[in-house]
Image (tube, helix red, strand yellow):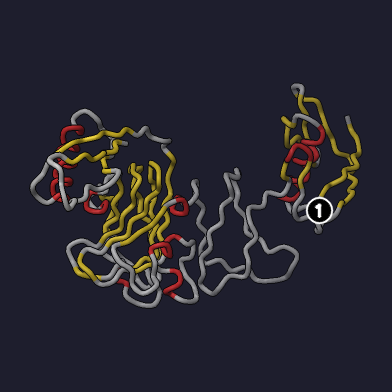
Amino acid sequence: MQTSVELMLACSQFHVKIRLPELHVLNVNASRAIILEGRIVVDDAPNLPHAVCLLFALIYDLNLDYTKTIRETFCPEGISVVGRCAVIPDPLPGNTVSYSCHGMEGRYVNVVRSGRTAHLTLCEVEVYETENLAFKGTPTHSSTFNDWDAENAIDGLRYGPDTGSFCSATTSESNPWWRLDLLDYYDISTVIITARPGCCEDQTNGAEIRIGNSLDNNGNNNPRCAVTSGFLLGYTISYSCHGMVGRYVNVVISGSTSALALCEVEVHGKFLGHRNKYFLRLKFSSSGDVAAESDKILHQLQSALASHISDFNLSWTQLPEEEEEQTEESTHTLKLD
């Protein structure tokens, strides 16, 4: 069958009527096929509207003539004909901005300045199979230098006009650390860290990246993915963690007195699914330091359970506190994930 189709396109602010000459549609296995310049290019379109939408997508991708005023066009059945992920605003010099494409599929990634004569300059384009998990998490660190909050390390800005507005930093202290709670359990493939651009690359070099499910020693005892090195001012370096599993991502400078500065921490991986949680109520009496006894009990239970359970996290729902008037036995609750 050969036909000409008149199609009404509903756009965000107006309607555009376009006549498509000689759209070739063939029946192929009870579906529709599109012939472009004499060749079958699509053979599985389920109906005519779908075929027309796909034709527009092909015209756009092949840079053939199309209506320049169409920017956001959707055909029947919710089919997007323009595979646009985002529009980049005017960035600040040296700024890095992340965009989520919400699982768009494709072989080619294009960056184009349409409808104008201009240069296109890109210092780096990074494409990831998964979104930046850091945006879902809750950060904290061992201390805060001025207003260099822990949240600044996951604000999506590697660089900005004022270093303190987009970097996190601790005060100078022994074993400074930064931790990200992903709030669930992930198979982590990559951690990307950006150092300060203005000074002090030593505040990022030599830090350990640790991933796991334990909060022992504030999470700094979890298995190690890598040790940072090679940072110059403003550098961004990617570390492969080869599918380490965990809820917590820590960055810690161990064994020295220093500040820890992180301008951006990005985490990529796959969601492992929600885990069951169990609660265990314990009664114990102690004449010594309650905090020390609590850590000792956790360690003993971890060791005992490790021979039976391969992947679990044991923590207090509320840390035991010493009371002014202690009864002979105190009751506390443990949570087992």
* Residue 80, picture quadrant: top right
Can residue 231 be seen here? The reply is yes
Q: Residues within 10 Å of mark 1 (few under 14, many from 20)?
A: few
* Residue under numbered circle 1: 66
Say which quadrant the C terminus sits in. top left
The count of marks equals: 1
Q: In the picture, which quadrant includes the N terminus?
A: top right
Q: Does residue 235 show up?
A: no
Query: In which quadrant of the rendered view does residue 273 lie?
Result: top left
Q: Amino acid at mark 1?
A: Tyr
Give coordinates of residue 68: x percent, y percent: 80, 58
Which residue ends up furthest to the front in the rendered image? 325
**Residue sitting nearer the eye, 124 or 72:** 72
Q: Pinpoint residue 20: horizontal percent, then vertical percent.
A: 88, 44
Residue at position x 72%, y 62% from top? 114
Q: Say if 16 sits above or below 164 in the image.
A: above
Place of residue 115 in the rendered image (x, y in percent of width and height, measured from the top left) = 75, 65
- Which quarter of the picture shows residue 104? top right
Residue appearing at x 36%, y 74% in the figure: 146
Q: Residue furthest left?
A: 287
Q: Residue at x 89, y 33 (%)?
A: 2
Q: Is residue 85 above or below residue 237?
A: above
Q: Position of residue 219 (x, y in %)?
A: 27, 51
Q: Secondary structure at mark 1?
A: loop
The answer to whether 72 appears left or right of 160 in the picture is: right
Residue at 37% across / 51% down in the picture?
A: 181
Left or right of residue 227, residue 123 in this image:
right
